[in-house]
Image: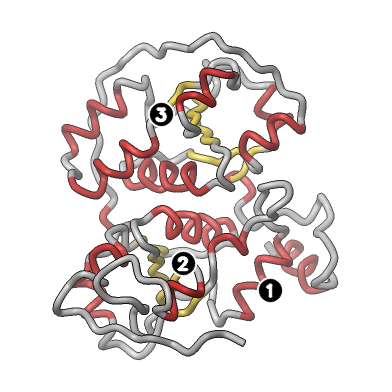
């Protein structure tokens, strides 16, 4: 860790990080070339792209997962038995590594990453750059659907990864809270309303989730760039943090990036603004537009 942060300190902020200067938790990201060397017996690959995209061509041995279905179900039903059945149907076991990919800058993949982590999966990673990276690496592509063998699963939640509205209301009474809003600036300032009320949770720091990812490659930005972004937005990696967005997906990308950079105690307010902005008992700020 000391060598890593020495690397980041010496690196000019406008220069890409050298290959030896990895993110503090590099195991959270998988390179396309490395994934191509794995077999389904070694790693389970989940494809979170739309079904039509999966059918048109996918990573051999990968399993399609309905990201929209997972998002809706987790928002309304966190019954361990129901999720044990859903996860078991994909043949997933907690002891085998899981790699997720999508084609939307890891937004959907990160949501599924977070859900699996909530359900106790210790070894879950994202394909850095998603489908774009796989094509760039010239990885093999097939149209043959891989059908996993369903297995019994007995999932238990990790409550420390999730935070509720009532917990945030209590958190607002503490002076050292750190809440990060991963939505767009227009949503944060209340100019774009996706609920009854627009604005943000009082005291929340704002960092658009899209700023975490290189728009051309769809890969997460280099350690020095992420470090600079968090510093510029007043986000400390050594403090417990709550992330939120509209419905938990973009907040999952933010949670992922924070953990990638070494942060601990990161919780996702999964119900996010869809709940907070429509509630009657929640305070709302409307920060001025950023210049």
Tell me which numbered mark, 2 or 1, is placed earlier along the sequence: 2
Q: Secondary structure at mark 2?
A: loop
Which tag is nearer the camera, tag 3 or tag 1?
Answer: 3
Q: Which residue is mark 3?
A: 65
Q: Position of residue 87 (x, y in %)?
A: 31, 28
Image-quadrant location for residue 27: top right
In the image, 234: left or right of 239?
right
Q: Judge by depth and name the residue closer to the eye, 210 or 204.
A: 210
Q: Is residue 181 above or below residue 214?
A: below
Tell me which numbered mark, 2 or 3, is placed earlier along the sequence: 3
- Residue depicted at x 59% and y 16%: 60
Q: Position of residue 82 (x, y in %)?
A: 18, 32
Q: Which mark is residue 183?
A: 2
Tell me which numbered mark, 3 or 1, is placed earlier along the sequence: 3
Q: Which mark is residue 62?
A: none
Which residue is at the far top? 144
Which tag is nearer the camera, tag 2 or tag 1?
Answer: 2
Q: Secondary structure at mark 3?
A: loop
- Of the 4 image quadrants, the one containing the N terminus is bottom right
- Residue depicted at x 52% and y 58%: 259
Image-quadrant location for residue 170: bottom left
Q: CA distance from mark 2 to mark 1?
A: 19 Å
In the image, 63: left or right of 175?
right
- Of the 4 image quadrants, the one containing the C terminus is bottom right
Which tag is nearer the camera, tag 2 or tag 3?
Answer: 2
Q: CA distance from mark 3 to mark 1?
A: 34 Å
Do tag 2 and tag 1 residues touch (Cβ < 8 Å)? Answer: no
Q: Position of residue 32 (x, y in %)?
A: 69, 32
- Residue depicted at x 73% and y 62%: 4
Q: Which residue is mark 1?
A: 228
Q: Residues within 10 Å of mark 1 (few under 14, many from 20)?
A: some
């Amino acid at each position: 860790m000391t060598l890593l942060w020495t690397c980041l300190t010496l690196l000019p902020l406008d220069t890409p990080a050298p290959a030896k200067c990895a993110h503090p938790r590099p195991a959270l990201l998988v390179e396309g070339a490395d994934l191509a060397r794995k077999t389904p017996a070694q790693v389970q690959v989940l494809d979170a792209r739309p079904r039509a995209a999966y059918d048109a061509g996918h990573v051999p041995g990968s399993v399609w997962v309905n990201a929209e279905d997972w998002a809706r179900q987790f928002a309304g039903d966190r019954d361990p038995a129901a999720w044990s059945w859903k996860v078991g149907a994909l043949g997933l076991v907690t002891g085998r590594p899981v790699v997720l990919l999508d084609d939307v800058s890891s937004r959907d993949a990160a949501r599924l990453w977070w859900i699996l982590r909530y359900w106790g999966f210790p070894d879950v990673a994202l394909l850095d750059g998603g489908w774009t990276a796989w094509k760039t690496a010239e990885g093999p592509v097939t149209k043959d659907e891989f059908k996993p063998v369903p297995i019994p699963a007995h999932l238990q939640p990790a409550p420390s990864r999730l935070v509720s509205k009532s917990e945030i209301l209590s958190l607002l009474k503490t002076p050292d809270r750190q809440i990060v809003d991963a939505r767009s600036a227009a949503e944060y300032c209340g100019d774009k309303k996706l609920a009854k009320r627009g604005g943000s949770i009082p005291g929340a720091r704002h960092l658009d989730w899209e700023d975490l990812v290189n728009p051309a490659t769809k890969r997460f930005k280099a350690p020095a760039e992420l470090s600079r972004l968090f510093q510029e937005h007043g986000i400390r990696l050594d403090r417990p943090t709550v992330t939120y967005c509209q419905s938990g997906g973009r907040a999952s990308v933010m949670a992922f990036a924070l953990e990638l950079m070494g942060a601990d105690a990161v919780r996702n307010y999964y119900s996010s603004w869809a709940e907070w902005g429509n509630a009657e008992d929640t305070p709302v700020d409307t920060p001025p537009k950023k210049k």
